[in-house]
Amino acid sequence: GAVVSQHPSRVICKSGTSVKIECRSLDFQATTMFWYRQFPKQSLMLMATSNEGSKATYEQGVEKDKFLINHASLTLSTLTVTSAHPEDSSFYICSANKGGSTYEQYFGPGTRLTVT
Amino acid sequence: AQSVAQPEDQVNVAEGNPLTVKCTYSVSGNPYLFWYVQYPNRGLQFLLKYITGDNLVKGSYGFEAEFNKSQTSFHLKKPSALVSDSALYFCAVRDRGSQGNLIFGKGTKLSVKP
């Protein structure tokens, strides 16, 4: 199998605080992980591509200083939302490439962030 | 630019009837196409993909999709719908210009009534 986990599944934080979301590939190594954001009843929008051992590549319009991504190992990428505001409330989903020629991405279960 | 279109926001089907969820794409070169399903407050689950080879692709849970190059379509189908198939379905194309991220359609909500 190819399982990706996210932690936490839900988090509520106060405005101005920071929150970290973890994405782990449990049974495979992922040199590349992706972070998506999904608004209610909308599609997934790519925020950034996370590469192990190097800086993340952010999509246009995504603030790299606000959404800090660290891909410290082949099985773990983290997204930290800094100085969170209510408009950052969303469903954040990570995915990982298993590698090889499958081209499949395996998605985590998502993290529901609510900023009050 | 590569893009994916899902023309229907919602598809309603009676249980036991065949279902089709439409997807068209716009890519340069040969496309890598995917279907994913999302249940409420959950991540995406892979259903099937087309990379090359047979145009009819069979996937998980009895779903299949047909790649039609001339119509640039990749419609998702199932011969007999189940109530448990009710979910949000996303068509996606792999962005060749990047490190492999997916470009998603807006999603189609499938509702299967008993």
Image (cartoon, grey):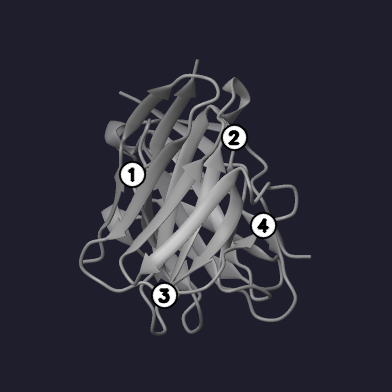
Residues at marks 4 and 1 touching, judged by CB atoms closer than 8 Å: no
Which residue corresponds to mark 1?
Answer: A109
Q: Earlier in the sequence, mark 3 or mark 1?
A: 3
Q: Residue at x 72, y 70 (%)?
A: B27
Q: Amino acid at mark 1?
A: Pro
Left or right: where does residue B79 sit relative to residue A92?
A: left
- Relative to B86, is A13 above or below? above
Q: CA distance from mark 3 to mark 4?
A: 30 Å
Subunit of label 4: B
Q: Residue at x 55, y 42 (%)?
A: A37
Residue B16 x, y percent position in the rendering = 31, 37
Q: Earlier in the sequence, mark 2 or mark 1?
A: 2
Q: Amino acid at mark 3?
A: Thr
Residue B45 x, y percent position in the rendering = 35, 51
Do callouts 4 and 1 point to residues on the same chain?
no
The answer to whether residue B50 shows anywhere in this view is yes
Residues at marks 3 and 2 touching, judged by CB atoms closer than 8 Å: no
Left or right: where does residue A1 sit relative to residue B69?
A: left
Q: Secondary structure at mark 3?
A: loop
Q: Secondary structure at mark 2?
A: loop
